[in-house]
């Protein structure tokens, strides 16, 4: 196989608590993460040597700082392979948004190049390597089928650094409106804020997990929680404004994902979501608005439609 296509899903955090700093410099967290339909699409083409990346978004770096590059180089370093690859990234997930796009792309790179370069690495091997690239990379690698035929969407509990993962029942189907304000939030800054975790006792994910298992989306929405909101919203009031806008449009629940700044609203019914997104776009012209859905199925890998463009 000389070419391959991978669809790399975004994720949202339905619950995110920061428990404290670890001895290794990372933070202890507990989180519930959910794949969503919004995804990047990556095309890989084998070549003799080197790693080249092209992207339809000029703001995305195409050098060694890109997690796609880091994942590919790590595979070469770990296996001693001398293969090369050209990668074309069709970027659809907003960058630096709390939706895990770069991490998902790195996971897709691990999975695709394991097949393209015939490295014969196991899922356990790729999980070990993913932790060297980024915490959220493990989430997406974990969701890969054991034969690497697809990434199966769903809901996971993350503990430790967020990469000690357990599959839990999937969130009931629902539609999402995502609002992405034109700001960048530093994850490092958010974690280092002296105000993080000062507004009460630590939250436990049990209630939202029980609600998810009950199969009631609206009940699950009652327990959405993100500790970072107490740091992000005072500094970036637009995040709070977007949450209020979505609630005024009758979202069952709304939350900032990850360390932000993207805010999502969950809607059990699909009938009026496009209309709602249109109204928000009209009222808040600075924000990019996306309509998508929760997803527990499979994200595709392919060769028939992965012909390189250009």
Image (spheres, grey):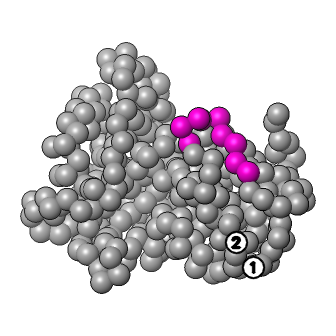
> Mark 1 sits on what residue?
79
Quarter placement of the C terminus: top right
Say which quarter of the image contains residue 296. Answer: bottom right
Q: CB atoms at circles 1 and 2 under 8 Å apart?
A: yes
Judged left or right of residue 305, residue 266 is: left
**Label ID, residue 75:** 2
Magenta range is 52-60
Give how far across and how far down residue 84 sits, in percent: 81, 61
Within 10 Å of the Cα at label 2, are there few (<14), some (14-19), or many (20+) other Cα atoms?
A: many
User: Which residue is pictured at 60% across the width and 75% down the height?
Assistant: 129
Q: Secondary structure at mark 1?
A: helix
Give how far across and how far down residue 170 sits, in percent: 48, 60
Viewer-closest of 292 and 11: 11
Residue 18 magenta-highlighted: no
Residue 105 seen in render: no
Give how far across and how far down residue 264 sits, in percent: 37, 41
User: Which residue is pictured at 43% across the width and 28% down the height?
Assistant: 288
Residue 57 magenta-highlighted: yes
Residue 283 seen in render: yes
Judged left or right of residue 114, residue 293 is: left
Quarter placement of the N terminus: bottom right
User: Which residue is pictured at 27% across the width and 62% down the height?
Assistant: 191
Say which quarter of the image contains residue 56. Answer: top right
**Label ID, residue 57:** none
Spatial CA span between label 1 and label 2: 6 Å
């Amino acid at each position: 196989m000389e070419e391959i296509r991978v669809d790399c899903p975004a994720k949202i955090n339905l619950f995110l608590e920061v428990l404290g700093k670890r001895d290794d410099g990372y933070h202890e967290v507990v989180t519930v993460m959910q794949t969503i339909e919004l995804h990047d699409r990556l095309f890989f083409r084998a070549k003799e040597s080197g790693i080249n990346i092209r992207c339809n978004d000029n703001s995305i770096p195409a050098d060694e700082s890109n997690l796609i590059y880091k994942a590919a180089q790590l595979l070469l370093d770990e296996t001693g392979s001398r293969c090369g690859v050209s990668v074309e990234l069709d970027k659809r997930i907003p960058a630096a948004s709390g939706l895990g796009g770069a991490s998902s792309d790195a996971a897709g790179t691990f999975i695709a190049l394991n097949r393209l370069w015939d490295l014969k690495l196991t899922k356990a091997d790729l999980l070990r390597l993913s932790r060297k690239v980024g915490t959220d990379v493990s989430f997406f690698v974990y969701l890969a089928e054991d034969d690497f035929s697809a990434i199966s969407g769903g809901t996971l509990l993350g503990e430790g650094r967020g990469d000690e993962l357990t599959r839990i029942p999937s969130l009931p189907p629902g539609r999402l409106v995502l609002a992405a304000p034109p700001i960048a939030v530093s994850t490092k800054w958010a974690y280092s804020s002296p105000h993080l975790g000062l507004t009460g006792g630590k939250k436990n994910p049990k209630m939202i997990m029980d609600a998810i298992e009950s199969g009631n989306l609206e009940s699950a929405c009652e327990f959405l929680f993100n500790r970072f909101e107490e740091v992000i919203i005072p500094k970036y009031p637009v995040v709070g404004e977007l949450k209020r806008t979505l609630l005024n449009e009758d979202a069952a629940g709304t939350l900032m994902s990850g360390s932000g700044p993207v805010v999502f609203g969950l809607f059990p019914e699909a009938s009026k979501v496009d209309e709602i997104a249109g109204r928000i776009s009209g009222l808040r012209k600075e924000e990019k608005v996306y309509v998508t859905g929760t997803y527990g199925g499979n994200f595709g890998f392919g060769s028939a439609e992965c012909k390189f463009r250009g």
